[in-house]
Amino acid sequence: QVQLQESGPGLVKPSQTLSLTCTVSGGSITTSNYNRYAWSWIRQFPGKGLEWMGVIDYDGNTYYSPSLKSRTSISKDTSKNQFSLQLTSVTPEDTAVYYCTRAPRLGASHNYWGQGTQVTVSS
């Protein structure tokens, strides 16, 4: 059973960089002939819907939400079976629950989710 677990600071100061890591267990983040997984970050604002932030695909290509592209970076570390999110120049409006997810391929539904981690941006 694949499991994803987000980790990182729960409190970030305005103008700083938010850094989160997703550790994958029960499955490999490494590309093979049998998988073309897409690894995403999604966030949920208080009382609101979900916002897709970006994805890194099986080849390491990255795609970002246009509204966040200038501030977002996603990378993966196959040696640690992890992928990460960096969001620069955060403001209180970036306060949300952040989820990491896996989809079977780009454009497919996210069928595995982490439990989510609350990140608050405040001085």
Image: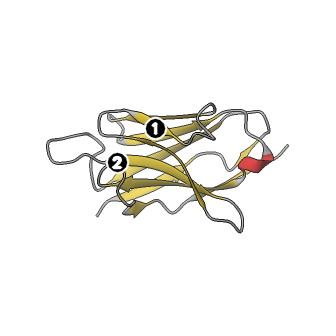
Helix, strand or loop at label 1? It is: strand
In the image, taking residue 16 as reference, residue 82 lies left or right, namely: left
Residue that extends furthest to the front in the rendered view of this protein = 66
The answer to the question of whether label 2 and label 1 lie on touching residues, with beta carbons closer than 8 A, is yes
Visible in this render: residue 121?
A: no
**Where residue 8 sits in the image (x, y, percent)?**
59, 45
Could you say which is closer to the camera, residue 80 or residue 50?
50
Above or below: residue 49 compared with residue 102? below
Q: CA distance from mark 2 to mark 1?
A: 10 Å
Q: Residue at x 30, y 34 (%)?
A: 59
**Where residue 74 sits in the image (x, y, percent)?**
49, 36
Q: Residue at x 43, y 35 (%)?
A: 62
Q: Where the C terminus falls, by quadrant?
A: top right
Task: Give the amino acid type for the residue marked by disc 2 in the picture.
Answer: Leu
Above or below: residue 5 compared with residue 63? below
Q: Where the N terminus falls, by quadrant?
A: bottom left
Task: Give the amino acid type for the residue marked by disc 1 in the picture.
Answer: Tyr
Could you say which is closer to the camera, residue 56 or residue 67?
67
Mark 2 neighbour density, 10 Å: few (under 14) some (14–19) many (20 or more): some
The residue where tag 2 is placed is 106
Q: Residue at x 65, y 46 (%)?
A: 9
**Where residue 6 sits in the image (x, y, percent)?**
51, 52
N-terminal of the pair, mark 2 or mark 1, is 1
Could you say which is closer to the camera, residue 33 or residue 11?
33
The residue where tag 1 is placed is 63
- Residue 102's label in the rendered image is none
In the image, taking residue 15 as reference, residue 76 lies left or right, namely: left
Residue that extends furthest to the bottom in the rendered view of this protein = 47
In the image, taking residue 77 as reference, residue 18 lies left or right, namely: right
